[in-house]
């Protein structure tokens, strides 16, 4: 099969930042599915791993990355029970295994869902990683109850990004929250509004804008951009007994003491935790992806796809990574095979 990978962590403009090569098509065992891939999407995690996994060294075998895919089940392992050969599926994969930048991939069926029937291949490829991250942030980390928490406020930092785009929709349409998103450019502001945000505030003067709309403090904060940079600010903005969730991490230790007097809860969200550690509830991701599929098929959610590149090629992967590295992309970028 054809695959695209890298042997060194090079700038994306370097000739060999990605290389195409041939490798054996794998065979599934256990809980694995063999999926013939039809489309992939590119996320910030892709370029972060590309720029760090082979730094100051040269790998003997090219590393295949990629953590979003749509495809067809071609073969199944002996322990599978959720899918049949020919099923159309979508998933975000496992950080510890070979990625989706290939013609075929093995993936544990317990982290795979049925592709939304109403969406195109490209539209479906845009969903898994961001959908799982947003869903887990709201319903597994904060544990929002749509009945008792309806109307509470959530501040979503980086509302126009891939995760923010679907988090706005889930927070508004499923959780019933009052959604405040951050954005600064006219096109990203409009995108957040189109996704369903009740308010859009400028992250350059966050506190002032929140006061103007009458929400100087909020119940929940979802950080999808820069936890360290916002830490002192969000500690002020969170309500007593509120909850902060971050996906970004921090290069420096954070002072959790600033949350103490308010009894504020803080959670990390890493979509890969369940697959990395084969947690007891690993199949929760299968259920979440199927729920998200239903939400698309019944018209509750709208696509976050903004750019589709045609053809599985080094050129298109480089272009997609350049777009992610710019930090200015809105919605999701997909490569259709």
Image (cartoon, rainbow, N blue to C red):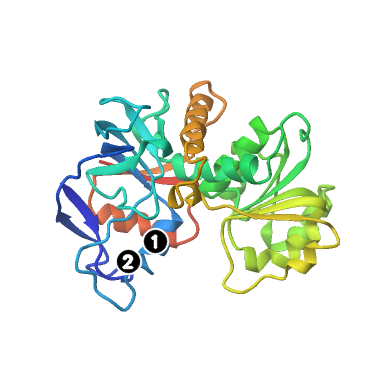
Q: How crowded is mark 1: few (under 14 residues within 10 Å), some or many (20 or more)?
A: many
Asked whether, in this view, residue 63 is left or right of residue 179, the answer is: left
The relative height of residue 97 versus residue 39 in the rendered view (above or below) is below
Sequence-wise, which precedes: disc 1 or disc 2? 2
Asked whether, in this view, residue 299 is left or right of residue 213, the answer is: left
Q: Which residue is drawn at 47% across and 50% down?
A: 272
Q: Position of residue 79 (x, y in %)?
A: 32, 33
User: Helix or strand or loop: what does disc 2 sit on?
Assistant: loop
Q: Where is residue 149 in the image (x, y as percent from the top left)?
A: 77, 35
Asked whether, in this view, residue 24 is left or right of residue 48, the answer is: left
The quadrant where residue 103 appears? top left
Q: Where is residue 180 in the image (x, y as percent from the top left)?
A: 71, 46
Q: Residue at x 67, y 59 (%)?
A: 203
Q: Which residue is drawn at 36% across and 27% down?
A: 81
The relative height of residue 121 versus residue 160 in the rendered view (above or below) is above
> What's the distance in space between the residues labelled 1 and 2, CA to CA?
9 Å
Residue 47, label in figure:
1
Residue 12, label in figure:
2
Q: Residue at x 72, y 45 (%)?
A: 154
Asked whether, in this view, residue 259 is left or right of residue 248, the answer is: right
Of labels 1 and 2, the one closer to you: 1
Whether residues under marks 1 and 2 lie with C-beta atoms below 8 angstroms apart, the answer is yes
Which sits in the foreground, 292 or 337? 292
Which sits in the foreground, 149 or 177? 149
Can residue 196 be seen at all in this image of the molecule? no
């Amino acid at each position: 099969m054809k695959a695209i990978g890298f042997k060194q962590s090079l700038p994306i403009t370097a000739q060999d930042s990605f290389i195409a090569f041939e490798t054996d098509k794998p065979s599934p065992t256990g809980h694995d599915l063999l999926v013939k891939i039809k489309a992939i999407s590119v996320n910030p995690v892709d370029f972060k791993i590309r720029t760090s996994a082979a730094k100051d060294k040269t790998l003997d075998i090219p590393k295949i990355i990629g953590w979003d895919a749509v495809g067809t089940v071609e073969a199944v392992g002996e322990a599978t029970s959720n899918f049949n050969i020919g099923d159309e599926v979508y998933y975000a994969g496992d950080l510890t295994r070979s990625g989706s930048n290939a013609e075929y991939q093995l993936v544990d069926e317990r982290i795979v869902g049925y592709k939304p029937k109403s969406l195109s291949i490209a539209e479906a490829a845009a969903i898994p990683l961001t959908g799982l991250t947003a869903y887990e942030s709201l319903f597994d980390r904060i544990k929002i109850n749509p009945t008792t928490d309806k109307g509470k406020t959530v501040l979503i930092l980086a509302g126009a990004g891939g995760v923010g785009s679907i988090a706005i929709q889930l927070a508004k349409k499923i959780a019933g929250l009052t959604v405040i998103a951050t954005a600064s450019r006219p096109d990203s502001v409009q995108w957040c509004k189109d996704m369903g945000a009740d308010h859009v505030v400028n992250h350059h003067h966050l506190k002032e804008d929140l006061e103007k709309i009458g929400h100087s403090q909020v119940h929940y904060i979802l950080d999808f951009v820069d936890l360290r940079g916002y830490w002192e600010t969000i500690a002020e903005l969170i309500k007593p007994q509120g909850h902060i969730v971050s996906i970004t991490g921090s290069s420096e230790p954070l002072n959790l003491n600033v949350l103490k007097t308010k009894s504020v809860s803080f959670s990390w969200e890493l979509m890969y935790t369940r697959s990395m550690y084969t947690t007891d509830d690993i199949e929760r991701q299968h259920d979440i992806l199927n729920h998200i599929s239903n939400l698309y098929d019944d018209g509750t959610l709208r696509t976050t796809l903004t750019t589709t590149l045609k053809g599985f090629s080094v050129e298109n992967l480089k272009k997609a990574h350049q777009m992610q590295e710019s930090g200015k992309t809105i919605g999701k970028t997909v490569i259709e095979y």
